[in-house]
Amino acid sequence: MREFVVEADGGSRGNPGPAGYGAVVRDAVTGETLAEAAEYLGVATNNVAEYRGLLAGLRAARELDPSAVVRVRMDSKLVVEQMSGRWKIKHPAMKPLAAEAARVFPPGRVTYEWIPRESNKHADRLANEAMDAGGRGERWRPSEPAAAPGASAPRAAAPEPPGPPGDAAAGAARVRAALAADRPATGPTGEGTGSGSRADAGARSAQSRRTSRVQEPALPSDAAGPTGAADRSEAADRSEAVRADARAARTVAAPGWGPPDMGAPATFVLLRHGETPLTPQKRFSGSGGSDPSLSDTGREQAERVAAALARRGTIEAVVTSPLARTRQTAAIVAARLGLEPTVEDGLRETDFGAWEGLTFAEVRERWPDDLNAWLASPDAEPTGGGESFAATGARIAATRDRLVARYAGRTVLLVSHVTPIKTFVRLALGAPPEALFRMELSAASLSAVAYYRDGGASVRLFNDTSHLR
């Protein structure tokens, strides 16, 4: 029986921040490199990136020989201990990833081994190359043949695009959409735009890990893990997910916090369009329906927003969804600001399929099973081939990153719809897909997200439109 060694790693420049993974498959006997895989993930934590690297390595090994046995070597004590079954998996973003990794090969055919970080340089380099490529708006490509000259070694297939967390059956596809889903043009803040050389990647790797893993909060007493000098290090890795959440909370709680050289953020002021005749009736109104225009009330709302934004004087550009109600709202605001709106197709509303124009109650009466599935899983599509929330998340993440690259350091008004705006906020907060059902977004309401160079984002909400009167 053939034996492979899989070495995998992942990193996040900000934790959470622009992230990527790398994985390499070697022949256990000869040490020959047989396959490489790497991908830029957008905004994610170190742990999610590490799990994604593990998945990519296991899948590459399975493509080479599904009957092989595999020895996984990683410098993440957290992943090694969790996948070995010695530590419990508590973080909701990790559970489906771990479950999917466990299904790649039959039980008993994969073992896990912790190695020092300096022994995992190949996978670390690939992860940094992927982050650098993402920073340039490119997909990762191998810089050299994976195998020795003259060898005909296959490479790992390009990974699937990311998608949001959910149950283990849906697996990592949903986690990927929740945490960034797709390959941004520059990463949320243009981080990592260096040459991509090995020397540069190594330097950036060391810097990125120092940035994301120093000055951690004290460990909670119940996360102590085994005892001993080496085990104290293991305990620190074990609670890294908890510390990442704490760091993200501090960033959101203190907008603009960061090193002195972060520079001006790219700030998106998110404006939901004004009311249409369907809005007060709470009918599904997406990109696949009748494309209604603004009502008289909706135009009045847009005028109030325009006056408020003109008083502030901070908007430098206006970008709008292609649908009629958003283009009309954008035109009213842009005229007041003396700007010309630009249309961005990625800002369009979700396509609700056969549900377009119907109320929630009407949909439940006609397609109760489809509606229940849609409420339970971000991968479920509305009846009739509509767009899932996972697909919307991937589209919005890609759109966000294109716009961040285009408007770095500027304040831009994005005129869009309920689901896209909620998705912008959800991704900035690192919240799961079900958070979409816990937000209310009024017509003509404003929210704002600022994206900093370190990958952090801060969110400001102004949901009640009464402040504009």
Image (tube, rainbow, N blue to C red):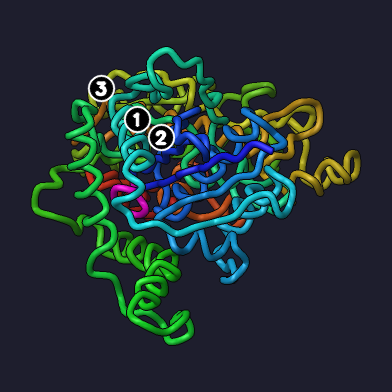
Element carrying mark 1: helix
Instruction: Residue at 70% x, 42% y: name it.
Output: 281
Q: Main secondary structure of the magenta part?
A: loop
Provide the residue designation for mark 3: 339
Q: Is residue 16 magenta?
A: yes
Q: Is residue 371 magenta?
A: no
Element carrying mark 2: strand
The quadrant where residue 42 appears: top left
- As measured in the structure, the alpha-carbon distance from the residue carrying label 3 to the one carrying label 2 is 35 Å
Instruction: Residue at 49% x, 46% y: name it.
Output: 179
Q: Mark 3 or mark 2: which comes first in sequence?
A: 2
Q: Which residues are drawn in magenta?
A: 12-17
**Above-or-below relation of 220 to 346:** below
Q: Which label sits on residue 134?
A: 1
- In percent of width and height, residue 369 lies at 88, 45
Instruction: Residue at 18% x, 42% y: name it.
Output: 203
- In percent of width and height, residue 212 lies at 28, 57
Amino acid marked by disc 3? Leu
Q: Which label sits on residue 152?
A: none
Amino acid marked by disc 2? Tyr
Along the viewing direction, whichever of 353 and 395 lies nearer the viewer: 395
Mark 3 or 2: in front is: 2
- As measured in the structure, the alpha-carbon distance from the residue carrying label 3 to the one carrying label 1 is 31 Å
- In percent of width and height, residue 377 lies at 71, 47
